[in-house]
Image (spheres, rainbow, N blue to C red):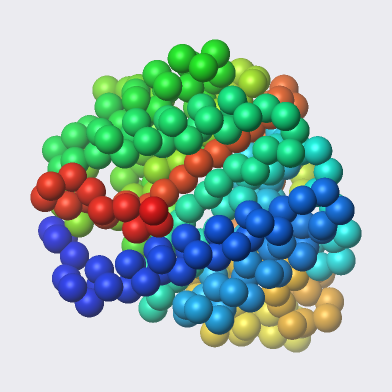
Amino acid sequence: MSDGPLDEETLAKYREAGSVLRQVLDEAVEKVEPGVTHLEVAEFAEARIEELADGCAFPVNISIDEEASHATPGRDDETEFDDGMVCLDCGVHVDGYIADAAVTVDLSGNPELVEAAEEALDAALDAVAPGVETGVVGGEIEDVIRGYGYTPVLNLSGHGVAQWDAHTGPTIPNRGTDRGVELEVGDVVAIEPFATTGRGKVTEGSKEEIYSLERDRSVRNRSARKVLEQVKEEYRTLPFAARWLDEPRAEMAITRLEQQGVLHGYPVLKEDDGELVSQAEHTVVVTEDGYENLTA
Ligand code: CO
């Protein structure tokens, strides 16, 4: 996957993205409490990221209870934090180089579910080194989570990141498998165990607030064209939130662009049985000695 060790300039950008992300995630966690809206926390974190780095690598994900990923508040969303299991997943880029990390804030009274994901992440990181197969890393995750009596979310996985690409190879499964690939020096990977009280499978819900550019092509409709221009100019190939768009009737334009294959939508992913999901995530660079945690 990788082209060998990262050059110093690239590594410096990844490190900056990682340290901004750590700071913003810590600040955002402090704001998560009953009565505060999801939108307030998302907008706070996104504004801090814009202020301290080049931009968000994707919209702040706020997933509650059975939601596992791809949930972000809509433009006028007034949903407040209550007594849920809150996964907060943020991404930062510096010149397109991405750091991706997540924490779970438990307002639901299930601290062990959070511990399971965090401990699984620690075990996975302990295994990371060049030459180690991704399925072995996944096995560490699975063992810890099952040891707690929970199930890893089996159809979500960690992933590589690259410049302007928030989701690339290699895949880091959340289960043991012998079909992995060997990690290589210079790989930059986001490792993200999800633990659930359910059977460990997520499916797409109906809600969709996050999109990315799939295929650039000329569009006739004026409103759709303005949306496309903003996406190409500001977000390029990175995922963005519908609420970020300046166009007043963006929703209709988005539907149109999705139908034409210009935009790709990411429906919210939910645990199949409606059971709770927790998440922990760091982005690391694989080095000769093992790894460097960018988001520690
Ligand atoms: Co993430």
Q: Is residue 20 above or below residue 89?
A: below
Q: Residue 9 vs residue 33: left or right? A: left
Q: Pick out the residue farthest to the front.
A: 30
Nearer-the-camera pick, 214 or 210: 210
Query: How many badges with numbers are in the image?
Result: 0
**In this orientation, does residue 90 appear?**
yes
Q: Is residue 142 above or below residue 126?
A: above
Nearer-the-camera pick, 75 or 86: 86
Q: Residue 226 vs residue 90: left or right? A: right
Residue 144 place in picture, x, y as percent: 42, 22
Residue 63 place in picture, x, y as percent: 68, 45
Looking at the rendering, which quadrant does residue 93 occupy?
bottom left
Q: Is residue 116 above or below residue 148?
A: below
Looking at the rendering, which quadrant does residue 134 occupy?
top left
Residue at the (53%, 49%) spot, across then down: 102
**In this orientation, does residue 259 appear?**
no
Residue at the (72%, 29%) spot, across then down: 109
Residue at the (27%, 23%) spot, across then down: 178
Residue 35 place in picture, x, y as percent: 86, 53
Nearer-the-camera pick, 33 or 173: 33
Residue 290 place in picture, x, y as percent: 18, 45
Residue at the (68%, 38%) spot, across then down: 106
